[in-house]
Image (cartoon, rainbow, N blue to C red):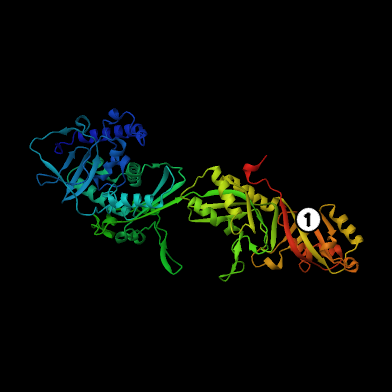
Amino acid sequence: MAVHVDKKMRLDDNLNQGIQRANDLYMQKTSFLGRRQKDEADQISPVLPNMRSVSGDINHAKCALLLQVLFKNVRVPRFGIVSIDGSSKLIQSTVMHMYALNHESVPLTLYLQLKEILGVIEDANTTYKFEKLDTICPACVGVLQHADGCQVIDPIINKLETENYMATTYNLSLTLPTSMLPRNHALALHVYNKLVEQGQSAAVASMVRADLLDSKDPIKTVLAYHIKERYNIQQVVDSPLKMTVVLDHPETVGDHVFLASVSSPLMKLVKQRKKGQTFFTGDSRVTIVEALKSLPDEEAMQVTKVPPEPATTTFDIKVELLHDSTLIGGRYIKLSREYSQTPWSIRGARLTDFSVSESIGEPLKKYFKCDDYKFSTAGREDANVRMLGHGRPFYIQMVNPRIPEVSPEMYVKMEEEINHSENSHAVLVRHLGRIQPADVKIIKEGEQTKRKTYSALVWLSTPITDELIEKLNQVGSKEFIVSQRTPIRVSQRRAHMVRPKTIHHLSVSKLPAKSIGTDENMKAKSQFLRLIMDTEAGTYIKEFVHGDLGRTSPSFASLAGAAADILDLDVLEVDLVWPPHTAP
């Protein structure tokens, strides 16, 4: 069969009617994506979407593979050189039109075989054949050519099998070689010129230069089909498992650079260096597309190759998988004065051998098979401060978990393992359980808005008398505000400012006799007391006690009328409902 090109009286009208009808039916039929099993017998539309609805790449018939996903029983030739008696003609085969120019295969548009729409005239004397293309497609640099082949599909399946995520869905992000944009533009210009030379109307010739959709859509559909067939996992836009497929073609990576040197450039490259590497910015895909649209045809013929030169190498592929983090909430109790909250290092040297975050995070990693974890808390205590009472609220972010969901019984098992580990003398956990991302704001707000209770062993420079105890307790029976300049000990990592903080309650008491000996004279001259404080979150307790060289005012020392220092500090309570699943 061949399209009768000698008489164009019906072809233009038929093409336009076919395009409009194809677009209308395509919008109706896209609902078959992902559920082809429904009404398989009636899935074939009388027309096929034109290439504007199917693919942004006009040089290769592989975009017709989209039909195999939409309509299971459509059989399309894969790709080929089309020849009719050795001459170059506009021809139709099964589901596509091909335009053969000097043995370069260029699809003009895609259709089902509909005589009444396309005006097809059967010619018994015409023969045609398809031959496999061994060369690399000059416009898509092999991307559409191999979209459903082992070069693309196998690395994806291998990555899925190696990582072995417990997931039933994924969200695919696809990046194509940038060189496809200028190459498609150059090839479209080439075909347009050829069609005009052979007498085609401007309407027909302009079809190859229409604003085409990005090739990513049909390629993603083809990939989704094969991934579902081979790995039984479904493409879903909001899936927590993110698959990133990057197709790169180093040989043609600079094909678009000429756009920066045209007479009226829309694309301006900026050279930058970072970490010893030189790179350019200003050449986003959107910028390249707009620059190509504004490029006059005459200038394009001068500044770049039309048609594009054939590629000699195929593209590279990189596949990455990343699952949304699993968030676990709980409370920890720290019984040691030798554990920092997180690993504490200065210039590569650790100042503490152990940390709370490692004591909790390391045992959890194996349950979720994650890459890493991030530990966050409602405030923090110094390494030499204990966290007692009900414990400090925390959440831990399990990064890229292969096992994102576990049963409630597993959380109980994790809690028991941590509480019976070699670090259980120092770190215990309570109420481990799954939390949602929205719950994190409770921790963030709690860092600065909740109340905290402390117990401190304080030394005074003068003996402690009953009168002094009564005086301090009277002051602490009412709320008062202290002004704290940024403490000296944290000035290198905290903003320099004055922070007003509320002391909600304060009480002091003498230490029990057994803690200071039995000698009556020693007890009378005791200079140690127990200080219990209920304060606003964010109060620097150590600085409040000794005054930090006058940077905190008033301080406990100024209230007592003596020099003061803090010997031991414990956090007794953090007033926060956490985790959310423990709320009454």
Q: Is there any visible trace of residue 143 in the rendered image? A: yes
In the shown orientation, is residue 260 left or right of residue 458?
A: left
Relative depth, front residue between 296 and 238: 238
Q: Residue furthest right?
A: 467
Relative depth, front residue between 208 and 159: 159
Task: Give the percent coordinates (x, y) of residue 107.
Answer: 23, 44
Position of 339 relative to 226 (above/below): below
Position of 544 relative to 327 (above/below): below
Task: Give the percent coordinates (x, y) of residue 232.
Answer: 36, 42
Say which element carries label 1. Answer: strand
Q: Amino acid at mark 1?
A: Met
Relative depth, front residue between 528 and 109: 528
Q: Residue at x 64, y 58 (%)?
A: 425
Position of 444 relative to 54 (above/below): below
Q: Residue at x 23, y 54 (%)?
A: 136
Q: Is there any visible trace of residue 262 in the rendered image? A: no
Q: Quadrant of residue 183?
A: bottom left
In the shown orientation, is residue 505 left or right of residue 197?
A: right
Residue tagged 1:
533
Task: Give the percent coordinates (x, y) of residue 292.
Answer: 34, 53
